[in-house]
Amino acid sequence: MADTIETLLKETRTFKPPADFKRRAAVRSAAIYRQASNGRLRFWASQARELEWMKRWHKVLDWKPPHAKWFVGGKLNASVNCLDRHVRTAKRNQVALLWEGEPGDRRAITYWELYREVNRFANVLKGLGVKKRDRVAIYLPMIPEAVVAMLACARIGAPHSVVFGGFSAESLKDRINDAQVRVLITADYGHRRGRRVELKQNADDAVAGCPSIEHVVVVQRDRVDTKEASAVAMKPGRDHWYHDLMREAKPSCKPAVMDAEDMLFILYTSGTTGKPKGIVHTTGGYLTQALATTRLVFDLRDDDVFWCTADVGWVTGHSYIVYGPLAAGVTCVMYEGTPDWPDKDRFWDIVERYGVTVFYTAPTAIRTFMKWGAEYPKQHDLSTLRLLGTVGEPINPEAWMWYHRHIGRRKCPIVDTWWQTETGGIMITPLPGVTTTKPGSATVPFPGIDATLLDDDGNEIKTGGGFLAITSPWPGMLRTIYGDDKRYRDTYWSKWPDIYFPGDGAKRDEDGYLWILGRVDDVLNVAGHRIGSMEVESALVDHPAVAEAAVVGKPHELKGQALSAFVILRSGYAFSDGLANELKQHVAKKIGAIARPDDIIFSADLPKTRSGKIMRRLLKDIASGRALGDVTTLADPNVVATLKKKYEGTE
Ligand code: PRX
């Protein structure tokens, strides 16, 4: 990423909010920042009042570092906020989800219809014995039933754990076992790039190793009339068709009264060890931040059509497909497939057809669109778009400018939003009617968020580079790591006392703008997806040919980072292209295709410091071609050892 960072820091262009955007914007004045900093808790309380509470809280924040309780004593239900309160108004017949499947099938689901489906499915879950606090896993394609399942869990107070449909059977198994899940909701299959993704097969392989699972509910993706058409095996007593259960279920289910601090969901994300972390989010604070940021960052109103292109398997899908936009009562687009199916204009076709007004995607997608060329968006009328957003990784100024020109037609503000699975909602971002933007900068903290830069000793850095730090608790913050509070303390709260360490490096310029530079730990960001180097290393050493492995990131034009794996073979194995491919495949099978290394570099040893630490900087330099040139065809495994000398003492 070195080249990108260099260009990032030389960027001087600025973009004021366009006058006509500002005139209609929800927030037009910077006074909101002053108000929030003069009374942080008052600001968040006023945001929480935008929700419907069954009982008002008696204390906004109870902070016993590193544990926060927000809206203490408050009671509410997330599904009531996303559904019931809308169906009591004229919104009842407004479309909640404009869904499109990859093969081109479409469904428009109103708030009323979604409400009925969620109620029914909540009763289905109850019928399967799911009670408040029982965990439910959701392993589905991007179909409306994923939203129904999440909200139905919320309705009865059962925390959901959504597992991205691209994860392998083994990843699903580990996540189910970690949270001791009782019910799994999956589909027979999904559609991706014209092929079937065999979710039920994966689910079966996973559940074979999950003693806690009692029931598996299977959605029929193509809603065909005959069960045989799905051609998946159903295990009697354990597996049930979604449509069979729904047919019998009553359409009304009383919402559970949830404490503000009751768990809403667990979402697994990668860390610096081999084991993913179950990030725990609770109800009142999370929903407050999801709604506040949806309203103020995306400036959403009743007539907007909002499209967040993330998958519900990631936090972006949780907060900005489901909880934020539905609590705000807007119409959301949801799309199942890839941007290049059947052709490279699919996204722009969708924008045009539904008249999308606010569009939120990842830099890796923008770089891919850039490579495909401006002729694809040009084929479509994108004039309904009025605001654009990005998330997930640093955006290089060139991609920002392309997005501005070719998608935003130089008219739309761009909000570059920095946040994490752990933060629950957006933390650093422009407000589109207020903030002057700079290509590549996430700009300034959201009102009510205390984010700054610190050095190793906790001294504040006014201008220059440092570690990003969040110095006060915020409503959407994770509450712990499921089943491992020690890891929670160690990972996030041990670098500085009572200050949250997100693991990112950043720079602050003379105007106080933050430029996020990327992770400073061993977490990698491939195409906006978080992957732990140790997770991939464990997958590699699980292969019989591998004695030892080290995985590092190298800059990649489209994906931001790609994975390079250095591998020492066990005796009896010889390096070959065939084995390299086998190892890549092995990782994809163990974790999921997103973790497949681009390169496998066979090595006679791994360069280590005298204290035994792997010299990652050397490996990164080799992987990115800085030390050796192209390494994909590295022939001499001893070369790493010879290079090591040069680097000794530099780590
Ligand atoms: O490194 C930061 C990067 O993504 C990480 C969080 O990943 P995840 O938990 O999967 O959540 C992604 C979606 C919220 C961060 O630690 N990141 C996220 N947004 C940005 C970013 N880096 C730079 N700019 C952003 N806007």
Image: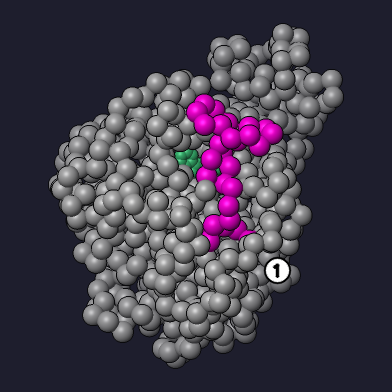
Measuring from the top left, give residue 85's x and y in whole percent: 36, 80
Q: Residue at x 33, y 24 (%)?
A: 12
Q: 489 or 584: nearer the eye?
A: 489
Measuring from the top left, give residue 202's x and y in whole percent: 59, 59
State which quadrant residue 83 falls in: bottom left
Q: 634 or 111: nearer the eye?
A: 111
Q: 64 or 440: nearer the eye?
A: 64
Q: Is residue 451 left or right of residue 301?
A: right
- Disc 1 marks a residue whose amino acid type is Gln
Number of numbered discs on residues: 1
Q: Residue at x 70, y 30 (%)?
A: 550
Q: Residues within 10 Å of mark 1 (few under 14, many from 20)?
A: some
Q: 645 or 88: nearer the eye?
A: 88
Quarter occupied by the C terminus: top right
Part of the protein shown in magenta: 451-479
Measuring from the top left, give residue 243's x and y in whole percent: 44, 79
- Main secondary structure of the magenta stretch: loop
Is any atom of residue 202 visible in this view? no
Would residue 583 be counted in the magenta stretch?
no
